[in-house]
Image (cartoon, helix red, strand yellow):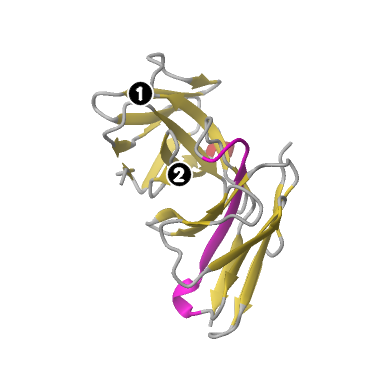
Amino acid sequence: DVKVTQSSRYLVKRTGEKVFLECVQDMDHENMFWYRQDPGLGLRLIYFSYDVKMKEKGDIPEGYSVSREKKERFSLILESASTNQTSMYLCASSSGLAGVGTGELFFGEGSRLTVL
Amino acid sequence: AQTVTQSQPEMSVQEAETVTLSCTYDTSESDYYLFWYKQPPSRQMILVIRQEAYKQQNATENRFSVNFQKAAKSFSLKISDSQLGDAAMYFCAYRSVNEKLTFGTGTRLTIIP
Protein backbone atom coordinates (compact mmCIF):
# COMPACT_ATOMS: atom_id res chain seq x y z
CA ASP A 1 0.00 0.00 0.00
CA VAL A 2 1.06 3.54 -0.65
CA LYS A 3 2.13 5.32 2.45
CA VAL A 4 2.44 9.06 2.79
CA THR A 5 3.83 10.11 6.13
CA GLN A 6 3.72 13.59 7.56
CA SER A 7 6.24 14.16 10.30
CA SER A 8 4.04 16.06 12.74
CA ARG A 9 0.32 15.62 13.42
CA TYR A 10 0.06 18.68 15.65
CA LEU A 11 2.27 21.75 15.91
CA VAL A 12 1.99 24.97 17.87
CA LYS A 13 4.25 27.83 16.80
CA ARG A 14 4.67 31.51 17.54
CA THR A 15 4.14 34.29 15.06
CA GLY A 16 7.35 34.92 13.14
CA GLU A 17 8.80 31.46 13.69
CA LYS A 18 10.10 29.42 10.77
CA VAL A 19 8.11 26.23 10.36
CA PHE A 20 9.01 23.07 8.49
CA LEU A 21 6.42 20.48 7.55
CA GLU A 22 7.90 17.27 6.24
CA CYS A 23 6.29 14.68 4.01
CA VAL A 24 7.69 11.34 2.86
CA GLN A 25 6.15 8.85 0.45
CA ASP A 26 7.33 5.31 -0.06
CA MET A 27 5.93 4.45 -3.50
CA ASP A 28 8.40 6.19 -5.79
CA HIS A 29 5.76 8.68 -6.94
CA GLU A 30 6.87 11.44 -9.23
CA ASN A 31 4.32 14.00 -8.10
CA MET A 32 3.91 15.48 -4.65
CA PHE A 33 1.54 18.14 -3.40
CA TRP A 34 0.88 20.36 -0.41
CA TYR A 35 -2.69 21.40 0.31
CA ARG A 36 -4.22 23.56 2.94
CA GLN A 37 -7.64 22.56 4.32
CA ASP A 38 -9.90 25.09 6.00
CA PRO A 39 -13.57 24.71 6.96
CA GLY A 40 -15.88 25.92 4.23
CA LEU A 41 -13.02 26.34 1.79
CA GLY A 42 -12.16 22.75 0.96
CA LEU A 43 -8.63 21.91 -0.10
CA ARG A 44 -6.50 24.55 -1.71
CA LEU A 45 -3.25 23.75 -3.47
CA ILE A 46 -0.20 25.56 -2.12
CA TYR A 47 2.64 24.03 -4.15
CA PHE A 48 3.34 20.90 -6.08
CA SER A 49 6.36 19.15 -7.51
CA TYR A 50 6.57 16.74 -10.41
CA ASP A 51 10.25 15.93 -10.08
CA VAL A 52 13.22 16.32 -7.80
CA LYS A 53 14.21 19.96 -7.42
CA MET A 54 11.18 21.02 -9.46
CA LYS A 55 8.32 23.00 -7.97
CA GLU A 56 5.26 24.77 -9.22
CA LYS A 57 3.04 27.29 -7.49
CA GLY A 58 -0.47 26.26 -6.73
CA ASP A 59 -3.42 28.51 -6.00
CA ILE A 60 -2.22 30.03 -2.71
CA PRO A 61 1.61 30.02 -2.61
CA GLU A 62 2.04 33.34 -0.81
CA GLY A 63 3.85 32.96 2.50
CA TYR A 64 5.07 29.46 1.69
CA SER A 65 8.01 27.81 0.01
CA VAL A 66 8.87 24.18 -0.68
CA SER A 67 11.87 21.95 -1.09
CA ARG A 68 12.26 18.66 -2.90
CA GLU A 69 15.82 17.46 -2.71
CA LYS A 70 14.91 13.78 -2.88
CA LYS A 71 12.16 12.07 -4.78
CA GLU A 72 10.46 10.69 -1.69
CA ARG A 73 10.52 13.87 0.39
CA PHE A 74 8.64 17.12 -0.05
CA SER A 75 8.91 19.84 2.55
CA LEU A 76 6.67 22.84 3.12
CA ILE A 77 8.30 25.87 4.71
CA LEU A 78 6.67 28.82 6.37
CA GLU A 79 9.47 31.39 6.50
CA SER A 80 7.70 33.57 9.07
CA ALA A 81 4.54 32.02 10.42
CA SER A 82 1.47 34.20 10.81
CA THR A 83 -1.82 33.57 12.57
CA ASN A 84 -3.66 33.33 9.26
CA GLN A 85 -1.59 30.27 8.45
CA THR A 86 -3.26 28.33 11.24
CA SER A 87 -4.74 25.42 9.35
CA MET A 88 -4.64 21.73 8.49
CA TYR A 89 -1.92 20.93 5.97
CA LEU A 90 -2.22 17.85 3.80
CA CYS A 91 0.54 16.26 1.77
CA ALA A 92 -0.29 14.01 -1.16
CA SER A 93 1.50 12.09 -3.87
CA SER A 94 0.62 10.51 -7.20
CA SER A 95 2.35 8.51 -9.86
CA GLY A 96 2.93 9.31 -13.49
CA LEU A 97 3.84 12.40 -15.33
CA ALA A 98 2.28 15.57 -14.02
CA GLY A 99 -1.14 15.95 -15.51
CA VAL A 100 -1.18 12.50 -17.04
CA GLY A 101 -3.23 9.58 -15.89
CA THR A 102 -6.21 9.27 -13.63
CA GLY A 103 -4.86 11.68 -11.07
CA GLU A 104 -5.55 9.65 -7.96
CA LEU A 105 -3.88 11.25 -4.99
CA PHE A 106 -2.64 9.41 -1.92
CA PHE A 107 -2.78 11.56 1.19
CA GLY A 108 -0.96 11.77 4.48
CA GLU A 109 -2.84 12.08 7.75
CA GLY A 110 -2.40 15.82 7.89
CA SER A 111 -0.53 18.28 10.09
CA ARG A 112 -2.61 20.64 12.17
CA LEU A 113 -0.67 23.85 12.67
CA THR A 114 -1.63 26.49 15.19
CA VAL A 115 0.18 29.82 15.06
CA LEU A 116 -0.19 31.93 18.18
CA ALA B 1 -10.44 28.24 -13.84
CA GLN B 2 -12.62 25.26 -13.13
CA THR B 3 -14.88 25.36 -10.10
CA VAL B 4 -16.46 22.57 -8.11
CA THR B 5 -19.55 23.23 -6.00
CA GLN B 6 -20.88 21.12 -3.18
CA SER B 7 -24.04 22.83 -2.04
CA GLN B 8 -24.66 20.64 1.02
CA PRO B 9 -22.25 21.48 3.85
CA GLU B 10 -23.83 18.80 6.03
CA MET B 11 -25.99 15.75 5.47
CA SER B 12 -27.30 13.03 7.73
CA VAL B 13 -28.79 9.63 7.06
CA GLN B 14 -30.17 6.78 9.08
CA GLU B 15 -28.00 3.69 9.22
CA ALA B 16 -28.89 1.24 6.41
CA GLU B 17 -30.62 3.95 4.38
CA THR B 18 -29.45 5.57 1.14
CA VAL B 19 -28.05 9.08 0.82
CA THR B 20 -27.01 11.16 -2.17
CA LEU B 21 -24.36 13.87 -2.03
CA SER B 22 -24.47 16.54 -4.72
CA CYS B 23 -21.66 18.02 -6.76
CA THR B 24 -21.65 20.31 -9.75
CA TYR B 25 -18.71 21.64 -11.69
CA ASP B 26 -17.96 24.21 -14.29
CA THR B 27 -15.71 23.48 -17.24
CA SER B 28 -15.37 24.05 -20.95
CA GLU B 29 -13.32 20.90 -21.41
CA SER B 30 -14.70 17.73 -22.92
CA ASP B 31 -12.17 15.29 -21.48
CA TYR B 32 -11.69 15.18 -17.73
CA TYR B 33 -11.90 13.08 -14.59
CA LEU B 34 -14.16 13.36 -11.56
CA PHE B 35 -13.52 11.96 -8.12
CA TRP B 36 -15.12 11.53 -4.73
CA TYR B 37 -12.73 11.47 -1.79
CA LYS B 38 -13.62 10.50 1.78
CA GLN B 39 -11.95 11.96 4.87
CA PRO B 40 -12.92 10.10 8.07
CA PRO B 41 -12.42 11.95 11.35
CA SER B 42 -8.70 12.20 12.18
CA ARG B 43 -7.80 9.84 9.37
CA GLN B 44 -6.34 10.01 5.90
CA MET B 45 -8.31 11.08 2.90
CA ILE B 46 -8.94 8.19 0.54
CA LEU B 47 -10.38 7.84 -2.94
CA VAL B 48 -13.93 6.50 -2.99
CA ILE B 49 -14.77 6.46 -6.67
CA ARG B 50 -13.56 7.83 -9.99
CA GLN B 51 -15.37 8.65 -13.24
CA GLU B 52 -13.85 9.34 -16.64
CA ALA B 53 -15.89 11.88 -18.58
CA TYR B 54 -15.69 9.93 -21.83
CA LYS B 55 -17.40 6.95 -20.21
CA GLN B 56 -21.17 7.02 -20.35
CA GLN B 57 -21.59 4.28 -17.79
CA ASN B 58 -21.77 5.47 -14.21
CA ALA B 59 -18.98 4.19 -11.97
CA THR B 60 -19.82 1.84 -9.12
CA GLU B 61 -17.74 0.59 -6.20
CA ASN B 62 -19.67 -1.75 -3.94
CA ARG B 63 -22.18 0.42 -2.03
CA PHE B 64 -20.95 3.61 -3.69
CA SER B 65 -22.18 4.74 -7.08
CA VAL B 66 -22.29 7.96 -9.01
CA ASN B 67 -24.85 9.68 -11.18
CA PHE B 68 -22.79 11.44 -13.84
CA GLN B 69 -24.75 13.90 -15.95
CA LYS B 70 -22.22 15.38 -18.35
CA ALA B 71 -24.52 17.87 -20.04
CA ALA B 72 -25.72 19.16 -16.69
CA LYS B 73 -22.17 19.05 -15.26
CA SER B 74 -23.40 17.13 -12.28
CA PHE B 75 -21.64 14.34 -10.42
CA SER B 76 -23.54 13.05 -7.39
CA LEU B 77 -22.47 10.26 -5.05
CA LYS B 78 -24.98 7.72 -3.81
CA ILE B 79 -24.21 5.65 -0.75
CA SER B 80 -26.46 2.66 -0.29
CA ASP B 81 -27.00 0.75 2.95
CA SER B 82 -25.21 3.45 4.93
CA GLN B 83 -22.91 2.24 7.67
CA LEU B 84 -21.45 3.95 10.71
CA GLY B 85 -18.04 3.81 9.07
CA ASP B 86 -19.31 5.99 6.23
CA ALA B 87 -19.35 9.01 8.54
CA ALA B 88 -16.81 11.43 7.10
CA MET B 89 -16.21 14.55 5.07
CA TYR B 90 -16.74 13.86 1.39
CA PHE B 91 -15.01 15.94 -1.23
CA CYS B 92 -15.85 16.08 -4.89
CA ALA B 93 -12.93 16.84 -7.19
CA TYR B 94 -12.39 17.64 -10.85
CA ARG B 95 -9.36 17.26 -13.02
CA SER B 96 -8.93 17.84 -16.72
CA VAL B 97 -6.02 16.44 -18.68
CA ASN B 98 -2.75 18.15 -17.76
CA GLU B 99 -4.26 20.11 -14.93
CA LYS B 100 -4.32 20.02 -11.17
CA LEU B 101 -7.12 18.60 -9.07
CA THR B 102 -9.76 21.12 -7.99
CA PHE B 103 -11.74 20.24 -4.87
CA GLY B 104 -15.16 21.27 -3.68
CA THR B 105 -15.74 22.59 -0.19
CA GLY B 106 -16.89 19.25 1.18
CA THR B 107 -20.00 17.68 2.69
CA ARG B 108 -19.95 16.37 6.23
CA LEU B 109 -21.96 13.15 6.40
CA THR B 110 -23.37 11.96 9.71
CA ILE B 111 -24.78 8.46 10.13
CA ILE B 112 -27.60 8.16 12.63
CA PRO B 113 -27.66 4.77 14.38
- Going 43% across and 33% down the picture, which residue do you hit? B97
Labels 2 and 1: the sequence-earlier one:
1
Quarter of the image where one finds residue A1? top right
- To which residue does mark 1 refer? B68
Q: Do marks 2 and 1 both belong to one polypeptide chain?
A: yes
Residue nearer the viewer, A10 or A70: A70
Q: Chain of mark 1?
A: B
In the image, B71: left or right of B105? Answer: left
In front: mark 2 or mark 1? 2
**Is residue A111 shown above or below B108?**
below
Quarter of the rendering containing residue A114: bottom right
Q: Amino acid at mark 2?
A: Lys
What element does badge 2 sit on?
loop
* Residue A84 magenta-highlighted: yes
Q: Is residue B88 above or below residue A6?
A: above
Residue holding disc 2: B100
Residue found 71% across the figure and 62% down from its top:
A7
Above or below A37: residue B11: above
Q: Mark on residue A65?
A: none
Residue at 54% over, 85% down:
A16
Q: Secondary structure at mark 1?
A: strand
- Residue B1 locus on image (x, y percent): 30, 46
The image shows residue A9 at horizontal and vertical percentages of: 66, 63
Which residue sits at x=54%, y=41%? A98
**What amino acid is at disc 1?**
Phe
Question: What span is in magenta?
Answer: A82-98
Q: CA distance from mark 2 to mark 1?
A: 21 Å
